[in-house]
Amino acid sequence: MKLIALAITLALWIGVTGLSEVGSDRYSVPLAIRVGENIEITNDPYPQVEIRVVGDKRRLGQIRERDLRISIDLTDLAAGDHVVNLSPSNVTAYDLPTGVRLEDIQPNRINVKLESVAAKEVPIKVRTRGQLEDGYEMASEPIASPEKVRVRGPASVIEKLTEVSTEIIDISDKKSDFTERGISLTAGGNSRVSLLETAVDVRFQIREVRAERVFLVPVEGLFDRKATVLLFGPRSVINGLKADQIKAVAAKDTNGEDIATISLPSEAQSSVEIKQVRLRP
């Protein structure tokens, strides 16, 4: 009976120690770094580190490398350059099975540059490609709505940032006003800059190309005198006008000098500007 009991005890001991065989494995895992409020990392610490874990071999076999991650808390560090030690005592490992522990991390130290976060408003630059239809031009610069956007990021980056820009808008063959909506914004590909508005509407005002032309017009009320009239407006309207459509009437200025008042035909009144009127001797 004693021999049987001893055999059973020995078998149990072998079974238990066999199930608890210790092993180790290495994995490449992402390193997450937590920093304080209004602080950002501005260099590129190791995005991946190599860890060695130790534990029950059966548990090790359950580990999937893609599920592993570790993090370190640097929320108590102020802005500046820091050398940070990585060890099982100050790093938190996630998704390790029970009975498996973090044993080592490589590299065991990293350089971390922390900067204060700044924010400001910057104007939006509208980028275009293509040409308007021949004979047409922009009446004004394209107008983004809103015209400015608030940006946020490391102070050294935000200080140098003077504008953000839209994605490229095609204006080929356009000849009338139009609005492009939901146009994406970019800070020049700088991933450290956050935009509080990520899209805007852009308004384009397009008009026919303008032209100037001088007309010689008889002045009613001043015998045998004429006025030179300089008009500015849409090229097709200006080119279509004739001198006999323009009416010049004699008048007096505040000093009692002869002048001419000009009237334009109805089709030109809203689009043509009278730039200069001179009485000829």
Image (tube, grey):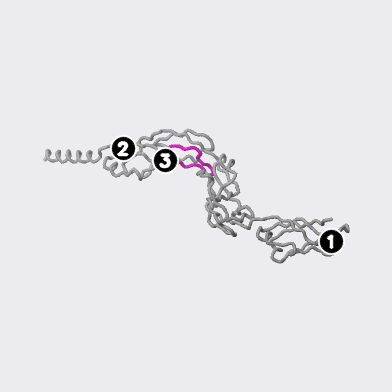
Residue underneath mark 3: 31
Which region is colored magenta?
Answer: 30-46
Of the numbered discs 1 and 3, the one sitting upstream in the chain is 3
* SS under mark 3: strand
Residue underneath mark 1: 224
> Relative to residue 258, is residue 44 drawn left or right?
left
- For the residues labelled 1 and 2, the Cα–Cα distance comes to 108 Å
* SS under mark 2: strand
Q: Which amino acid type is marked by label 2?
A: Asp
Foreground pick, 226 / 12: 226
Q: Which amino acid type is marked by label 1?
A: Asp
Of the numbered discs 1 and 2, the one sitting upstream in the chain is 2
Where, quadrant-wise, is the C terminus in this rendering?
bottom right
Residue 117 image point, x, y percent: 55, 43
Foreground pick, 35 / 175: 175
Labelled pair 2, 3 in contact (Cβ < 8 Å): no
Residue 1 image point, x, y percent: 11, 41
Answer whether residue 38 is magenta in the image: yes
Q: Based on the displayed image, in which of its 4 quarters is residue 217 positioned?
A: bottom right
Residue underneath mark 2: 25
> Relative to residue 251, is residue 66 drawn left or right?
left
